[in-house]
Every structure is written in structure tokens, then in C-alpha cells.
Image (tube, helix red, strand yellow):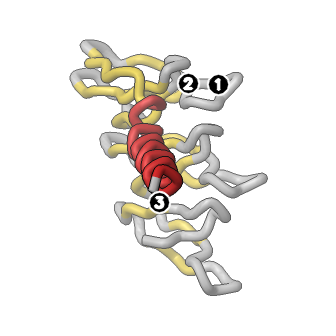
Amino acid sequence: MKKYITVALIFVSLVAGLILLPLEVLAKSEFLKYAQCRRAQGWSEGCVQFKANTTLELANNGGVISGTLANNACMRAQGWSEGCAQFKAGTLVTFNARGGVITGTVAIDSNLRPKGLSTAKTYKAGTTVTFNEKGEVVR
């Protein structure tokens, strides 16, 4: 009986840890009174201009997890090793831990590869896209 209780407690602890894990990444929110150039989490150089009077979600290291772009910005999607997509000013963008874009709104018609296809598809300007870890559009 003790063996089953021990296994159950370990299982509950692991599940609780997995549920709380994402909360440890998010350190705080910060309201921007003025537009600011900030680094996405995982970036070692460069920055993106984020819009005034909006809120940034920040990681423990101070890097941006999500925020509203002040200007169009050419950024690499998660899973891409080269190239970039233009993301639209005034829209929310989210970054993974290495600084790749997870979700954003394309500023111009963009040829991107959807999951499951070997060729690119054109996504119209103003379309919000979500990339998987391979850099494929999943939504």
C-alpha cells in the first residue's frame, strides 16, 4: 500500500511541476508609457521597437515574451535557420525561449510553408500565423 501511495505522490508532484513550469518563465508584465526598443528573450543582439501604451510580457531574464510592435519588423520564425518574415506594426507578436517568432501578423503577402506541405503558400498581409517548432505554419 505504501508503494502505491509513494508512486501516486510522485505522479502528483510531477504533474504539478509541469503545470507550474510555464509560470516560472514569465517574470512580469511591464506597461510601456513610451515606445521602446527591446530584445526578445533569447536574443543576444538587436532589438525590436514595441508600441507605447501597451504591455510587454517579460521572461525572468528581462527578454520580451510578447508585445505589440511599434513598426513593421523583419524577424525569423521559430524553427527557421535563415530568412525572415515581415510582421505588422500595431499587432501582437510572441517569441519562444530562443527568440523565434511563434505567433505574429504578416505585414506583406508572404510565402510560408504550411505544416504537411512541401511547397510554400501565400498568406495575405494582415493574416495572423502561428509557427510550430519546425517553422511550419500551423494556424
**Is 34 displayed left or right of 95 in the figure?**
left
Instruction: State the separation of the CA atoms marked 1 and 2.
Output: 6 Å
* Count of all numbered marks drawn on residues in the image: 3
Q: Choose mark 3 or mark 2, whichever is in front.
A: 2
Residue at (35%, 27%) from the top-left corner?
Answer: 56
Give 129 or 58, whichever is nearer the viewer.
58
Amino acid residing under circle 1: Gly
What mark, if any, has residue 128 been given in the picture? none
**Is 34 displayed left or right of 105 in the figure?**
left
**Is 60 displayed left or right of 100 in the figure?**
left
Q: Residue furthest top?
A: 33
Q: Quadrant of the N terminus?
A: bottom left
Instruction: State the separation of the CA atoms marked 3 and 2.
Output: 23 Å
What mark, if any, has residue 46 been given in the picture? 1
Residue 18 visible to an observer of this rendering: no
Q: Residue furthest right?
A: 81
Q: Are marks 1 and 2 in contact (CB under 8 Å)?
A: yes
Query: If you read the primary sequence from the N terminus, does the residue marked by circle 3 or circle 2 appear first?
Result: 2
Question: Callout 3: helix, strand or loop?
Answer: loop
Amino acid residing under circle 2: Arg
Residue 136 percent coordinates (x, y): 60, 69
Query: If you read the primary sequence from the N terminus, does the residue marked by circle 1 or circle 2 appear first?
Result: 2
Amino acid residing under circle 3: Ile
Q: How crowded is mark 1: few (under 14 residues within 10 Å), some or many (20 or more)?
A: few
Q: Name the residue under label 2.
A: 39
Question: Callout 2: helix, strand or loop?
Answer: loop
Residue at (31%, 23%) from the top-left corner?
Answer: 29
Q: Mark 3 points at which residue?
A: 108
Query: If you read the primary sequence from the N terminus, does the residue marked by circle 1 or circle 3 appear first?
Result: 1
Residue 3 visible to an observer of this rendering: yes
Question: Callout 1: helix, strand or loop?
Answer: loop
Q: Choose mark 1 or mark 2, whichever is in front.
A: 2
